[in-house]
Image (cartoon, grey):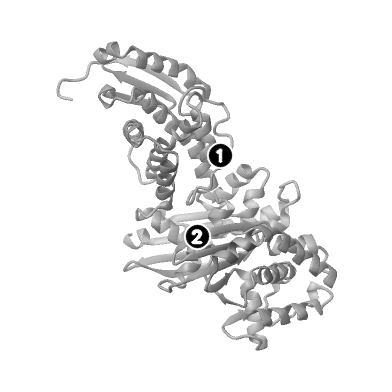
Amino acid sequence: MPERSETFAAVDLGSNSFHLVVARRVHGQLRYLDRIKEMVRLAGGLDGEGRLDMETQHRALECLARFGQRLRGIPAANIRALGTQTFRRLRHANAFLAVAETALGCPIDIVAGREEARLVYLGVSQGVAGKAGRRLVVDIGGASTELVIGDGSQAIELESLQFGCVTGSRRHFPDGLISEKRWQKARRSVLAEMQELQARFTRLGWEEAIGSSGTIRAAAVSCQQRGWCEDQLTAEALQKLVEEVLGKRNVEELDLPGFNEPRRPVFVGGLAALSAVFEALNIERMTISPYALREGALFDLLGRLEHRDPRETTVDAFMARYAVDRQQSACVCEVALTALGQLVAPAPMERDWQDMLRWAAGLHETGLNISHGSYQVHSGYLVAQSDMVGFSQHEQLFLAALVRFHRREISRALARPLPARLHDPLKLLLFCLRLAWVLSRSRDDRAIPHFRLRRKARKIHLSLDPAWAMAHPLTLADLENERGLLRVIGWTLELGLEARPADA
């Protein structure tokens, strides 16, 4: 159905709440059709070793199954699901992801802290589209707080700090008891973590502060209904709220206007973080946004589908920074994509594979400025460890593995950091990139042969023209060597000489 292709969904798997938003694109604009929110408190079930207790897992999977029902019928390419701080801390993330993705019915991307901050800013910016001026965006989640300074839709400075309403409440108010001593200790811990960014953010400055997420909205609604502020949360109103909360002995006594029951156990930790942010950044008033990470993920998804992909800009900037030979990268890219086209039937989802192969071809020589002899090691490290705007953690690890192992030995563990669903695609794309590197090694476009590939499961037959093979013994030796190297990952390469048809 045509309307299905114009329906999009984003899933935000936060450390406190899970959110699902569904929208339809009408005349170039998004019209929201459905919003679902459930408090799962994922961070509350995580121990110090990164293990998630069974009760929390069960609660999360039940929620994901309900979300999955709502997602049925929406094209897979039109859905993006994101895991945040608690997913980043999971000790055995891939094992839980496999079950979670089955329940949800689509892949889950774990995003790094700065990428989460960028997406939050992108989402909040949609609510103030067209409004000029620099702005500060603050989002207090369950296990992390994102702070961003930006101008328009462009983020300038991003930071993700390791405190949130769930983790703060567990650490400083574990039994629900409230005291001045505990409150000050919670605030001091947040202020200490903000020391480094305080001067940086203050120096950049902003004209408007905007808050998003449940903690900030709950605080604002409570103050507004008390008559302490109007449409914005002020520092004075926030202080009155703090005094009222500190007048209680236990979180069970909290009875604030506009306050919902599920937020009660985690509110004090979030409020301590909010109070510390107001003090550290000298915020006088804050506008409250209904938008957050989920809307940012939705707009970012549309950008990817409409060729406004921030990952393209990131890769291009990376290539410029490390003075990559663009002509050689383009040559490797063309050969690699030709190989992929012969091995995989065209399908909508294969566009992601093509993109990854293009970006890997663009980045595979970034380490040449560090060391020529083992540059692929440095290239892989740079891709894995840098802040790469637009990429999820799995996308970045996938790309880093392609770049790291595009030549010489292949590690048997190259796919271990990735979910099982990405293991075979990684190995297939790695074959294409390695073949392209071998055939392009001479850096002479005229030396690249016509070739044919046939694939049966993990066995690939490569056909080359005999005359070309006789004239290029070094390349033929490289291909023979490649046969042994590929066996490490369970792939078989067969070489055959086959004269090219005269009209080919």
The mark found on residue 291 in the picture is: none
Q: Amino acid at mark 2?
A: Ile
Q: Which residue is mark 2?
A: 156
Between 169 and 315, the one lying in front of the other is 315
Q: Which residue is mark 1?
A: 418
Q: Quarter holding the C terminus?
A: top left
Q: Quarter holding the N terminus?
A: bottom left
Check disc 2: other Cα within 10 Å, few if <14, some if 14-19, many if 20+: some
* Residue 4 appears anywhere in the view: yes
Q: State left or right for residue 427 relative to residue 229.
A: left
Point 63% across, 54% down: residue: 85
Point 33% across, 26% down: residue: 443
Q: Secondary structure at mark 1?
A: loop
Q: Secondary structure at mark 2?
A: strand
* Residue 74 appears anywhere in the view: no
Considering only vertical position in the picture, is 488 above or below 389? above
